[in-house]
Image (cartoon, rainbow, N blue to C red):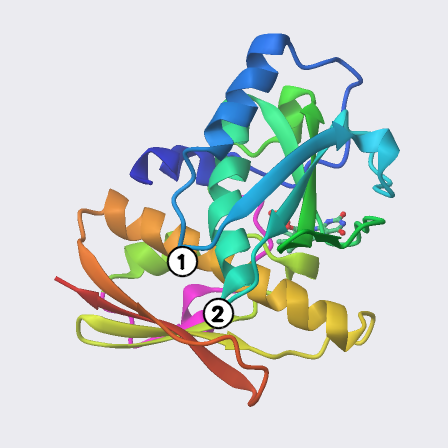
Amino acid sequence: MKELLQNVYKRKSVRRYNGQKLSQEELAAVEEYLHQLKPLVPIHLEFQIVPCSETNCKLNAEYCLLVYSEEGNLWLTNVGYMLEQWDLYLASLGIGVCWYGMGKVEEERQCDLVYAIMLAFGKCDADQFRNGDYDFNRKDVDDIWSGATDVRIGEIARLAPSAVNSQPWRVEQVDNKFNVYRQKGNVPLLSSQLYKRWNKVDVGIFLCFVDIALESNGYTFNRTLGTDTDKGRRVLVATYELN
Ligand SMILES: Cc1cc2nc3c(=O)[nH]c(=O)nc-3n(C[C@H](O)[C@H](O)[C@H](O)COP(=O)(O)O)c2cc1C
């Protein structure tokens, strides 16, 4: 995962595409990478790449990636964890991506799999990406990570994208052990049902950033996962123990 670090500072939600088409080679690379994503939990996913114009996505992207998953503990968190790797990889190819939680499909179920989310993608101009660790509208490390012993980790993890930029993660650290929580917030504009769903994807994206941060700073770790419950304001999603 550490090879994705440089793309953390480049990726951005791309909402303006330039109308150029992906080449066959680019499309093949994009599809191939879907088979290399590292899972958080062993849950089966399937993907469909369809023209964006055939979805309800309002962006002018060339394609949308539709993500279908088995259900199970942390399935949406797993979707966030896996597809964020893809988002970062596409940034390295100069292909724009935008997670699109507002997307809907006609068939929610496909055999044992259920629709999770879509991501729009396509060609865009270079100025649609970031050029470094500025231009981020994010909470400070101190606001999300208490007891941090190595702020380099939090400084990377805090850059994770989330639906409506809600950043619903909190971390509590004691020495070499830290807990990652999904925290409910108030987003009045969104139905709580949708928000509950995106929150889980968001925290998976955050775990992806945490892992990139740890691995690129030379840490090895053991991670224990929590649950998907909707009870309580704060839900323990993962405990990391650094070696
Ligand atoms: C799960 C999820 C769902 C999202 N849904 C939408 C969406 O429906 N429409 C949209 O324009 N952006 C959407 N976004 C993009 C976020 O608004 C964006 O990631 C956040 O504001 C941070 O900005 P950045 O991605 O440019 O760093 C979504 C992001 C995530 C992670």
Nearest the viewer among 218 and 208 is 208
**Lateral position of residue 74 relative to residue 186, left or right:** left
Residue 143 part of the magenta segment: yes
Examine the image and state in which quarter residue 174 appears: bottom left
Q: Are marks 2 and 1 in contact (CB under 8 Å)?
A: yes
Which numbered marker is on residue 73?
2
- Let me know if residue 215 appears in the view: yes
Which residue sits at x=51%, y=84%? 234
Which residue sits at x=57%, y=22%? 94
Quadrant of the drawing holding the C terminus: bottom left
- The amino acid on which the numbered mark 2 sits, given as a three-letter code, is Asn
Residue 15 part of the magenta segment: no
| Magenta span | 134-149
Please tell me whether the stretch drawn in magenta is mainly helix, strand or loop.
loop
Residue 128 lies, in percent from the top left, at 66, 29
Q: Residues within 10 Å of mark 1 (few under 14, many from 20)?
A: some
**Lateral position of residue 30 relative to residue 121, left or right:** left
Look at mark 1 in the image and give the residue it sits on.
Answer: 41
Q: Is mark 2 within 8 Å of ligand 1?
A: no
Quadrant of the drawing holding the N terminus: top left
Nearest the viewer among 22 and 91 is 22
Examine the image and state in which quarter residue 142 appears: bottom left
Disc 2 secondary structure class: loop
Question: 205 above or below 236?
Answer: above
Which residue sits at x=77%, y=19%? 18
- The amino acid on which the numbered mark 1 sits, given as a three-letter code, is Val
Q: Please tell me which of labels 2 and 1 falls first in the chain.
A: 1
In this view, which residue lies farthest toward the left? 243
**Lateral position of residue 124 relative to residue 208, left or right:** right
Question: 131 above or below 46?
Answer: above
